[in-house]
Image: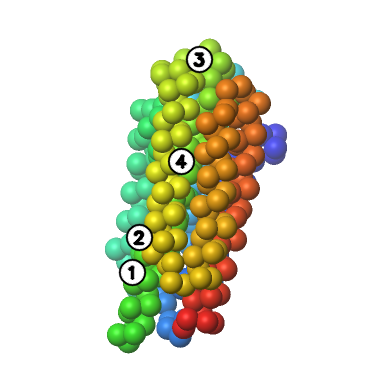
């Protein structure tokens, strides 16, 4: 029962989501000599609200996707849990908005659950569009953090530094978004037979495995070129250039190489595992670059 519930709310993704918030807060919004709107306690409240709303969203999606099926969990109980989690998430979010004197931001915690509910109700089948929405969740966490955690009383030099930190974060957002879409396509290729039986409208079902693979390959190449262009922008700084190349560009090139050779399910399963390694390397680059900016450049 508890295992089923945890699987439905995808607790690992929620923990990863919270980890990303604290990682970027510590790396790019803390220790640069200026104060920001959110303390780490406030960030904890933002994390709690986001976690409850995410869990509620997964439960809502599960409810509508299985409304005509028999499940191990009573659907009415799933519905009630979703409502309770939504209420708690909204209340905590509104409290945080009032606490940091950004009352209007409380609308985010009201509008997002409404959008999730309407989307889940009207999009029961899995589609490529649903992959895009899912892929945007993690990058959206960073955007939410930047909206809330704005710096206070910056000097001209600090504004320039903050602008650079924003550009770095936007780079991570774009790369994360593209990488997540590619991973979702690979998962759909792995599950194409099951999705076809369940009449899901995923890319491999609609276009075939080969065309879906080519789309994933194209997005991977775009992502790799984007990472490489960032490395070139820092070519005069050997440390940052080397970090981006070693932890970003080279792993992406290896992923692209394996994707080009992939033909069987086992190949795509291996690619799925490689994607986790690449995500880990990308995360490792965050504190590495942040440390260099804080204690060497700054």
Looking at the picture, how far across and down is residue 108, in whole percent?
35, 55
Query: Would you say the residues marked 1 and 2 are in contact, meaning their CB atoms lie under 8 Å apart?
Result: yes
Residue at 35 percent of width and 41 percent of height: 115
Nearest the eye: 83 or 271: 271
Q: Residues within 10 Å of mark 3 (few under 14, many from 20)?
A: some
Nearest the eye: 61 or 252: 252
Residue 163 sits above or below residue 84 on the image: below
Looking at the picture, how far across and down is residue 127, in whole percent?
41, 27
User: Which structural element holds mark 2?
Assistant: helix
Residue at mark 3 to residue at mark 1: CA–CA distance: 47 Å
* Residue at mark 2: 106
| N-terminal label among 4 and 1 | 1
* Residue at mark 1: 102
Residue at 60 percent of width and 55 percent of height: 281
Residue 220, which numbered label? 4
Q: Nearer the viewer, mark 4 or mark 2?
A: 4
Query: Would you say the residues marked 4 and 3 are in contact, meaning their CB atoms lie under 8 Å apart?
Result: no
Residue 90 sits above or below residue 149 on the image: above
* Residue at mark 3: 196
Residue 30 sits above or below residue 90 on the image: below
**Which quadrant holds residue 169?**
bottom left
User: Which structural element holds mark 1?
Assistant: loop
Give the quadrant of the N terminus. top right
Q: Nearer the viewer, mark 3 or mark 1?
A: 3
Q: Nearer the viewer, mark 4 or mark 3?
A: 4
Q: Residue furthest top?
A: 197
């Amino acid at each position: 029962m508890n295992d089923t519930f945890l699987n439905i709310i995808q607790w690992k993704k929620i923990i990863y989501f919270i980890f990303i918030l604290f990682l970027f807060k510590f790396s790019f919004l803390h220790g640069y000599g200026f104060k920001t709107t959110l303390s780490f306690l406030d960030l904890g409240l933002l994390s709690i609200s986001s976690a409850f709303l995410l869990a509620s969203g997964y439960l809502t999606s599960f409810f509508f996707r299985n409304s005509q099926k028999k499940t191990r969990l009573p659907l009415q109980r799933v519905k009630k849990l979703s409502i309770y989690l939504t209420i708690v998430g909204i209340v905590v979010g509104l409290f945080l908005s009032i606490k940091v004197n950004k009352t209007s931001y409380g609308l985010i915690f009201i509008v997002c659950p409404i959008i999730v509910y309407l989307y889940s109700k009207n999009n029961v089948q899995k589609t490529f569009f649903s992959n895009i929405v899912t892929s945007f969740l993690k990058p959206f966490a960073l955007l939410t953090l930047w909206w809330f955690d704005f710096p206070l009383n910056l000097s001209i030099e600090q504004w320039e530094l903050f602008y650079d930190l924003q550009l770095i974060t936007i780079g991570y957002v774009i790369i994360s978004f593209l990488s997540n879409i590619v991973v979702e396509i690979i998962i759909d290729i792995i599950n194409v037979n099951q999705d076809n039986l369940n009449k899901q409208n995923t890319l491999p079902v609609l276009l075939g495995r080969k065309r879906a693979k080519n789309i994933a390959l194209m997005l991977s190449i775009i992502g790799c070129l984007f990472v490489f262009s960032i490395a070139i922008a820092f070519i005069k700084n050997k440390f940052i250039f080397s970090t981006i190349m070693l932890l970003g560009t080279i792993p992406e090139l290896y992923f692209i190489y394996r994707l080009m050779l992939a033909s069987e399910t086992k190949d795509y399963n291996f690619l799925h595992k490689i994607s986790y390694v690449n995500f880990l390397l990308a995360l490792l680059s965050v504190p590495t670059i942040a440390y260099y900016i804080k204690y060497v450049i700054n």
